[in-house]
């Protein structure tokens, strides 16, 4: 049965990983039946923002998710996060919590690398000034590559002998070695296809093995680089340097501590703020806009009023948001996650029977699951229904769809599964 996607957060001490995790998992503004949940000390539930299917049918006022929330068609979908602790140089050699770090890492489908863009913490997370954070990005990757390559080369001779003896394909042999990293035959096949290698595995040189390990690392551990602490005055020059070195599509600029502060102030009734937005309204702002009651907001003291004004100038107006919401969006993007909406009644999009009407107070599109790009209708059926026998599957409009059809946004992403033989 396909498992739920898991996104790992990594980062050296004091880079802001804990703040980023807290800002991604703070569900204080969520409605519905899914409060913030810590699954265990390292796992938690974050919220990915997507466009809900309710907008296609003008049903935004009737959308009532079982988990997360839906605000005028902008839906927050739960997604599991893993706090991967122990990132220090030499992790692959067992330094620090290196062995545990790498063991935890292998469970993740994608990584969010939280980097201190201010350069005010060194490689071990100690306070400094003028540190080059691009070094952190390079050594995270080098640690993963060294870990995988070291394990592979330690038994390469026996791997080749067995490969020849059993007449295996390169995909089969490598999957036997890479399965411990949470890989699949599909991931290995994509890795080799991208390289287009001509020589058989038993003739691979050390250089070819390096290419394979690097390509596999890219395929198995796609990484979002979350450049944190963008409000620090030293961040600009570091961001500019990193932007020239890395794929711009993998970079998100963020200020996790700003997001946490804004949500806290909104929860306490001092400001009006929607997570991920570039706008913050205070009582004074709303009064100036013609609301004599100031939206019912509390009066800010001078300290917090100044902090919010500075935050507006240094983060929101300059970068468009705190960037935190976009971090998860980018991770979902590089994984190619597709939201699918299972419903019981395909005519009403509700969870009840045939007699349930569009106006049912039970709501529509109660559930949403995230599947990887390339998943089929059958994959979704197994994820949602488990081993239950499926008689047939209906899509939007009541049309039957085959299990081998692909799902995508707007195509086969609203499904009703009919149990039976």
Image (tube, rainbow, N blue to C red):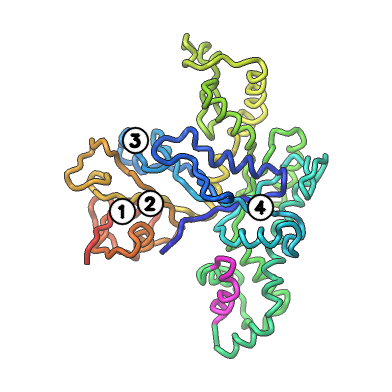
Please state if 357 lies on the left or on the right of 123 as rendered.
left
Q: Nearer the viewer, residue 358 or 1?
A: 1
- Quick one: which residue is furthest to the top in this view? 292
For marks 1 and 3, give the CA distance: 19 Å
Q: Nearer the viewer, residue 276 or 271?
A: 271
Q: Which mark is residue 415?
A: 1
Can you identify the residue that label 3 sits on? 60
Q: Earlier in the sequence, mark 1 or mark 3?
A: 3
x%, y% of residue 3? 45, 60
- Mark 1–mark 4 contact, CB under 8 Å? no
Residue in view at x 34 percent, y 35 percent: 60
Task: Name the image quarter holding the C terminus.
Answer: bottom left
> Which residue range is magenta in the image?
169-183
x%, y% of residue 260? 59, 33
Q: Is residue 87 on the magenta stretch? A: no
Secondary structure found at label 3: helix
How packed is label 1: few (under 14 Cα within 10 Å), some, or many (20 or more)?
many
409 relative to 258, above or below: below
Q: Earlier in the sequence, mark 1 or mark 2?
A: 2
Number of callouts in the render?
4
Secondary structure found at label 1: strand
Q: Earlier in the sequence, mark 1 or mark 4?
A: 4
Secondary structure mostly taken by the magenta-highlighted segment of the chain: helix
31 relative to 270, above or below: below
For marks 1 and 4, give the CA distance: 39 Å
Can you identify the residue that label 2 sits on? 340
Which-is-in-front pick, marks 2 and 4? 4
For marks 4 and 3, give the CA distance: 40 Å
Secondary structure found at label 4: loop
């Amino acid at each position: 049965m396909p498992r739920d996607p898991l996104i790992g957060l990594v980062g050296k001490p004091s880079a802001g990983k804990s703040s980023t995790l807290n800002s991604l998992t703070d569900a204080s503004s969520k409605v519905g039946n899914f409060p913030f949940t810590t699954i265990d000390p390292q796992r938690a539930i974050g919220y990915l923002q997507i466009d809900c299917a309710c907008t296609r049918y003008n049903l935004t006022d009737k959308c009532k998710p079982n988990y997360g929330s839906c605000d005028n068609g902008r839906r927050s979908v739960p997604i599991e996060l893993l706090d991967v602790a122990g990132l220090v140089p030499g992790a692959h050699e067992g330094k620090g919590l290196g062995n545990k770090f790498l063991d935890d890492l292998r469970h993740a489908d994608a990584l969010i690398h939280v980097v201190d863009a201010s350069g005010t913490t060194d490689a071990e997370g100690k306070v400094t000034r003028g540190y080059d954070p691009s070094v952190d990005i390079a050594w995270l990757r080098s640690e993963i590559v060294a870990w995988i390559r070291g394990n592979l080369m330690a038994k390469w001779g026996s791997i080749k002998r067995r490969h020849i003896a059993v007449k295996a394909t390169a995909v089969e042999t490598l999957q036997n070695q890479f399965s411990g990293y949470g890989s699949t035959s599909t991931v290995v096949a994509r890795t080799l296809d991208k390289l287009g290698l001509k020589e058989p595995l038993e003739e691979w040189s050390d250089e070819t093995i390096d290419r394979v390990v690097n390509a596999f690392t890219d395929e198995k551990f796609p990484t979002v680089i979350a450049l944190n602490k963008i409000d620090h005055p030293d961040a600009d020059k570091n961001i500019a340097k990193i932007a020239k070195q890395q794929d711009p599509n993998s970079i998100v600029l963020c200020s996790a501590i700003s997001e946490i502060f804004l949500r806290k102030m909104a929860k306490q009734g001092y400001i009006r703020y929607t997570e991920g937005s570039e706008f913050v309204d205070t009582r004074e702002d709303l009064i100036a806009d013609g609301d004599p009651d100031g939206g019912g907001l509390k009066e800010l003291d001078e300290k917090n009023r100044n902090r919010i004004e500075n935050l507006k100038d240094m983060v929101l107006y300059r970068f468009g948001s705190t960037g935190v919401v976009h971090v998860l969006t980018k991770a979902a993007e590089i994984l190619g996650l597709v939201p699918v909406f299972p419903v019981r009644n395909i005519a009403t999009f509700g969870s009840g029977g045939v007699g349930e009407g569009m106006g049912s107070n039970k709501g529509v599109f109660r559930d949403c699951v995230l599947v990887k790009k390339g998943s089929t209708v059958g994959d979704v059926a197994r994820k949602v229904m488990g081993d239950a026998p499926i008689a047939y599957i209906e899509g939007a409009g009541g049309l039957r769809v085959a299990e081998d059809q692909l799902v995508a946004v707007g195509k086969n992403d609203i499904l009703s599964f009919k149990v039976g033989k």
